[in-house]
Amino acid sequence: MCLSDGGTSPKNISFFYLKYPLFCRETFPVAAFSPVIDAELAAFEVKFKEAVKSRAPLLDRITYYIINRKGKQLRPRFVLLSAKLFGPITDASYRAASLVELLHTATLVHDDVVDESLERRGFFSINALWKNKVAVLVGDYMLSKGMLMSVDNQDFQILSIMSGAIRSIIEGELLQLEKSRRLNLKEDVYLEIIRSKTASLLASACAAGAWSTTQNMDIANKMHKFGELVGMAFQMKDDLFDYGTDDIGKPTGNDIKEKKLTLPLIYTINHAPADLRRQLIYSIKNENRKPERVKWIIDQVIAAGGIEYASQKMDEYRLQAAAILDEFEDSEVKKAILQLVEYTTNRKY
């Protein structure tokens, strides 16, 4: 379903929001976040709108749509908090937050094209509204804007940190394509995939934020490790959503329907007797669109302890991340970061 050939205007998009508010709006509990960087976040939003401006009217219409469907802004929050943990937020901190948001948006837009996804977290995807060619170009534009912003301001170390994340994301995607076809993924490979695909960007966000106020690579490296651990826990929480019943923006069993191996399922397959393992793999390959078989797979995961195992691993990564923060002086900013870490593993969607 493509809603536009490229002519959707801000006015029409706003009307669509009003007509279908539950479908289009991604809501989240603002109270879950500390107000310690509220002023900086407001300033960041102004700067980010400036950062995405272009000379192409169509591109401006699309970026307007992207900005108005923003979610929890977790990555910019982590950039700004990681920066403020060590000193006053600088212009370089804001640029780092904008760069993270630009790179993250670009990867999501490209992912939706590759996955042929028509929606993302309750919103129509860019390719659903403007088709694949435009979506690919928008993603490319976001990448180029981020790099040019860093080069123009000589933020070379921040650009280097973030470029490493992009490399990791691509390597993770290719590793997943290579290893997941046989549906017998081992846990160590899964961990490497999510470390590359999900955790690397959050790790780079924390490192770039820390660097922007310290210019100290040792501190930036510690915050990189902190962000990586949080990112691992964040992805494991996403894995667990597939086995819950809360309204989280995607249906229960969606990962199974997409033949996506997540930690609860990997644990179950790798610890199941041979006969059950064969049945699970067969059902994932050939019966993943049958509701009764999806429910059967979920029941097997629950019975095997896959949910408990994934929850335990998630908590381990969260505690390791908190231990890194223990090395730094207590402050309201540190409390806010810990609160944000708690949110990533306690969130309902």
Image (tube, rainbow, N blue to C red):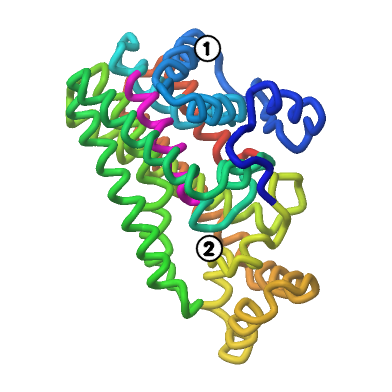
Task: Determine whether, in the image, residue 81 is placed left or right of residue 221.
Answer: right
In this rendering, the answer to whether 120 lies above or below 179 is above
> Extreme bottom residue here?
275
User: Which residue is pictured at 35% across the width and 31% down the height?
Assistant: 206
Q: Earlier in the sequence, mark 2 or mark 1?
A: 1
Q: Which residue is mark 2?
A: 263
In this rendering, the answer to whether 229 lies above or below 305 is above
Mark drawn on residue 153? none
Question: In front of the other: label 2 or label 1?
Answer: 1
User: Which residue is pictured at 55% across the width and 34% down the height?
Assistant: 342
Q: Kindly state the secondary structure of the residue where label 2 is placed.
A: helix
Which residues are the magenta region?
Answer: 95-111
Q: Is residue 50 magenta?
A: no
Task: Determine whether, in the image, residue 63 is placed left or right of residue 189.
Answer: right
Task: Determine whether, in the image, residue 124 is placed left or right of residue 61.
Answer: right
Going by the numbered disc 1, the residue's amino acid type is Asp
Residue 329 placement (x, y as % from top left):
33, 19
Q: Please, what is the dominant secondary structure of the magenta stretch?
A: helix
Q: Is residue 97 magenta?
A: yes
Q: Kindly state the secondary structure of the residue where label 1 is placed.
A: helix
Q: Are marks 2 and 1 in contact (CB under 8 Å)?
A: no
- How far separated are the C-alphas under marks 2 and 1? 35 Å
